[in-house]
């Protein structure tokens, strides 16, 4: 009886081991099959048009043309996703004087995105017979051949130190505001050696301090819109905006729309000026209240 029991146990263990071996083989075959499947997918991807870069989306460019970016990243018809170097492309893009930063990203299976961050062109300066763009860090692009969209105002009359200051002030302004300025001149007065004069595209003149004009021009669009104009858009009362201290609209004492560069008609302290200051200050208070409410 005991022999039969031992024989039964032995047979049972043998069957169990056999079943275990079969399961192990099934697992091995399954793993092998999955690996083979993935290897085949990889090979199909690598050696078919699926892995060729099919499209490149370019973002963030304004003054750098798409053709220049495409030339820099050098994506060819046979460029493949797995061999293309994004780091080399980014390095090449940054060689452009207007590109501050660049990021090239691959998107499976065969697309790429190129995002560039440009140095802003904040001003132009006349040199010989052409206007040279100046970037926000003060670099003059004397050999720049392309057209620029956000070229900023023309600056005139500044020595090197003051030119650096006005560039920083222009860079501080929102691009939308900077685009409303056609020209900036250094316009020193006996008691105001840092005075600058701005000529705007909506036919206003603005005077201010070289050290503070950037922050004070932030609300220029609202200031301009608050002034009374006729149906043609001309000011009903000719004058200029003074941002030297606070914000004031100063009517020209002559009542003429024309104004000489030395502001011969500028007068301080009369009742007309005080009334105009109150008018503009009231408009600025409304702007600030609206801003506080939005915040």
Image: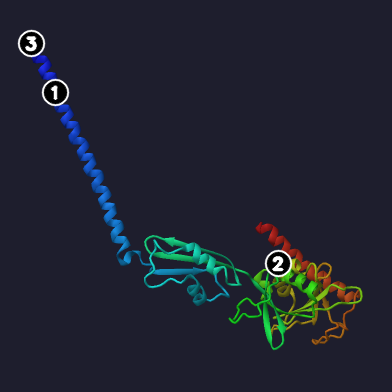
Name the residue: 84% across, 68% down: 245
- The mark lying in front, picked from 1 and 2, is 1
Q: Which residue is label 1 attached to?
A: 12
- Residue placed most toward the observer, 165 or 246: 165
Expressed as whole percent of the image width and height from the top left, the position of residue 190 reads: 92, 76
For label 2, the crowd category at 10 Å Cα-Cα, with few meaning under 14, some 14 to 19 and many 20 or more, is some
Report if the CB atoms under discs 1 and 2 are less than 8 Å apart: no
Left or right of 93: which side holds 246?
A: right
Report which residue position mark 2 lands on: 172
Q: Is residue 242 left or right of residue 49?
A: right
Q: Is residue 188 left or right of residue 114?
A: right
Displayed quadrant of residue 85: bottom left
Q: CA distance from mark 1 to mark 2?
A: 86 Å
> Are the residues flagged by discs 2 and 3 in contact, CB closer than 8 Å?
no
* Label pair 3/1, CB-CB below 8 angstroms: no
In three-dimensional space, the C-alpha distance between marks 3 and 1, rounded to whole angstroms, equals 17 Å
Q: Position of residue 217 (x, y in %)?
A: 74, 70
Q: Report the number of numbered marks.
A: 3
Residue 22: give x, y in percent of width and height: 17, 35
Q: Nearer the viewer, residue 154 or 44?
A: 44
19 or 275, which lies in front?
19
Residue lying at 73% horizontally and 73% vertically, measured from the top left: 226
The quarter in which the N terminus is drawn is top left
What is the secondary structure assignment of the residue under circle 2?
Answer: helix
């Amino acid at each position: 009886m005991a022999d039969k029991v031992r024989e039964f146990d032995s047979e049972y263990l043998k069957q169990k081991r056999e079943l275990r071996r079969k399961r192990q083989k099934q697992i091995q075959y399954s793993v092998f099959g999955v690996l083979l499947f993935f290897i085949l997918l990889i090979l199909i991807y690598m050696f078919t048009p699926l892995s060729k870069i099919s499209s490149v989306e370019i973002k963030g460019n304004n003054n750098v043309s798409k053709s220049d970016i495409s030339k820099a990243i050098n994506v060819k018809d046979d460029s493949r996703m797995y061999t293309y170097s994004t780091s080399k492309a980014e390095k090449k893009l940054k060689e452009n004087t207007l590109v501050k930063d660049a990021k090239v990203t691959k998107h499976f299976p065969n697309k790429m995105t190129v995002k560039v961050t440009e140095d802003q062109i904040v001003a132009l300066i006349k040199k010989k017979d052409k206007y040279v763009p100046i970037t926000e860090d003060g670099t003059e692009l004397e050999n720049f051949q392309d057209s620029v969209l956000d070229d900023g105002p023309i600056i005139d009359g500044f020595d090197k130190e003051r030119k650096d200051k006005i560039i920083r002030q222009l860079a501080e302004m929102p691009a939308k505001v900077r685009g409303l300025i056609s020209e900036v001149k250094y316009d020193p007065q006996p008691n105001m050696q840092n005075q600058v004069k701005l000529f705007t595209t909506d036919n206003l003149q603005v005077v201010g301090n070289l050290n503070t004009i950037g922050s004070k021009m932030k609300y220029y669009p609202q200031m301009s819109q608050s002034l009374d104009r006729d149906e043609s858009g001309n000011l009903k009362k000719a004058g200029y905006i003074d941002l030297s201290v606070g914000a004031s609209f100063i009517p020209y004492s002559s009542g003429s729309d024309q104004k000489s560069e030395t502001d011969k008609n500028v007068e301080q302290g009369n009742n007309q000026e005080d009334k105009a200051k109150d008018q503009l200050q009231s408009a600025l208070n409304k702007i600030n209240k609206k801003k506080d409410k939005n915040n």
